[in-house]
Amino acid sequence: MRWPVDETHDPARTSWVASANGHGDFPVQNLPYGIFSPTGEDPHAGVAIGDAILDLRACAAAGLLPASTNEACQSDTLNALMALALADRAALRGQLSAMLSDPAMEHAMTPLLHASSACTMHLPARIGDYTDFYVGIHHANNVGRLFRPDNPLLPNYKYVPIGYHGRASSVRVSGEPVVRPRGQRKPPEAEAPLFEPTQRLDYELELGVWIGEGNALGTPIAIGDAGRHIAGVSLFNDWSARDFQAWEYQPLGPFLAKNFHSTVSPWVVTIEALAPFRIAQPPRPEGDPAPLPYLRDADDQAHGALGLTLEVLLLTSAMRAAGAAPVRLSRGPATSMYWTIAQIVTHHASNGCNLNSGDLLGTGTISAPKRDGFGSLLELTTGGRDPVVLPNGEQRGFLEDGDEIILRASADADGFVPIGFGECRAVILPAR
Ligand code: CA
């Protein structure tokens, strides 16, 4: 299904919230949802607009929102808002866009704004389940080559959107520090594994797809219908302990190497806001099989990819102490996804598995074809063999304590105002 481009995307539309106009992430054309708490208040729903957050709960209480969305907007999670029917989601976005761009509303609505810098952000939803996919084909090739030099891409890859069930309890919002995990690793020369803090701590640049309307157990989601089951997208960092991963991953796949912490950005950029930035899924290389019919949809192939630019930045302790800015480790487009977000939703539910509003699907690491767009240190440093040299002379094979990883993303399209995702960041703390 295609998302309409409407007046909420009008590039001529500006906001009376002055900081929104020209804002890199949150102009009035974006309007992402999140859960925030102003100083002294409990967590509740808000909308990012420039450097401010509009209090959705207060808007609902003041009777400013469509009545059908009032209850969802007064919750302390976004689950109910994500579950809204398409027409209600569109009505809410339309109303917010109209109010935030109408100068006559400034007087009444200014008291409902909070400075973002004075607010704490929380997880957007109560995440019932988290699943991680593996759709970044360059990542799959790069990593496959490191783990299996002769056989990088297994024969199922071009038929099955590969994924595994992750751990929802350890998904944390941007800003919460990551404790270096302990676990089993087996150095090649050792006879038996050691139980130690990981020596190969890595990040993974991913997108997080939030499930909108769920599906009943036993009822698959048709590919042409997948769009209405997607509420929006955030940035997602699937922290990984590569030494644990190499030792534990066969025969059942990722476990403790992946479930100690995952970081998600606090703002849910809605699928409606992304409408102008949907692009054609890149054609598969010649000789690759076509997706099986349940994953094939002409409209999804024509408009199902995301026109995003993703980047990863690193700030080390030494850089922080010196007042240096974070250094960019990689930058690239999100077009290296072998499967669309609609295809991973449809595949997930294809056996009748039920998805619920607020479930989180990771895309898997998104790497561009070239090194300057690789989405993990495992790839950037060829498994730690070729360390990244930073401007201050420091080197990194993998992450050290005190390192902070920052993910960013922006959406651009000719004739539209670019929108961004805010930041997904976390600093590494020493093992306990
Ligand atoms: Ca991952």
Image: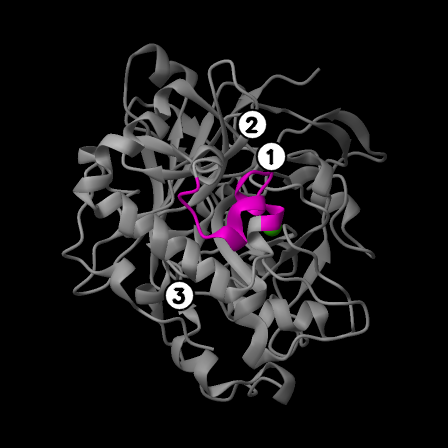
Residue at left offset 75%, top offset 24%: 196
Residue farthest to the right? 192
Q: Which is more foreground, mark 2 or mark 3? A: 2
Q: Is mark 1 within 8 Å of ligand 1?
A: no
Disc number at residue 76?
Answer: 1
- The image shows residue 154, relative to residue 262, as above or below, that is below
Where disc 1 sits, the SS reads loop
Report the Cα–Cα distance between label 1 and label 2: 6 Å
Q: Position of residue 84 (x, y in %)?
A: 57, 58
Q: Which label number is shown at residue 43?
A: 2
* Residue 59: image location, x then y, percent: 42, 37
Which portion, as a residue range, is magenta?
A: 63-80
Give the residue drawn at x 28%, y 29%.
110
Is residue 198 in the magenta section?
Answer: no
**Label 3 CB less than 8 angstroms from ligand 1:** no
Q: Nearer the viewer, mark 3 or mark 1?
A: 1
Give the alpha-carbon distance from disc 2 to disc 3, as whole Å: 35 Å
Instruction: Describe residue 405's horizontal placement relative to residue 352 as left or right.
Output: left
Tell me which amino acid carries mark 2.
Answer: Pro
Q: Quadrant of residue 239?
A: top right
Q: Position of residue 221 (x, y in %)?
A: 66, 75
The amino acid sitting under disc 3 is Thr
Mark seen at residue 335: 3
Pick out the residue farthest to the front. Answer: 63
The answer to whether any part of residue 22 appears in the image is: no
Comparing 75 with 157, the one in front is 75
Give the left or right position of residue 25, taking residue 78 as reference. Answer: left
Who comes first in sequence, dot 1 or dot 2? 2
Q: Position of residue 155 (x, y in %)?
A: 67, 76
**Mark 3 vs 1, N-terminal side:** 1
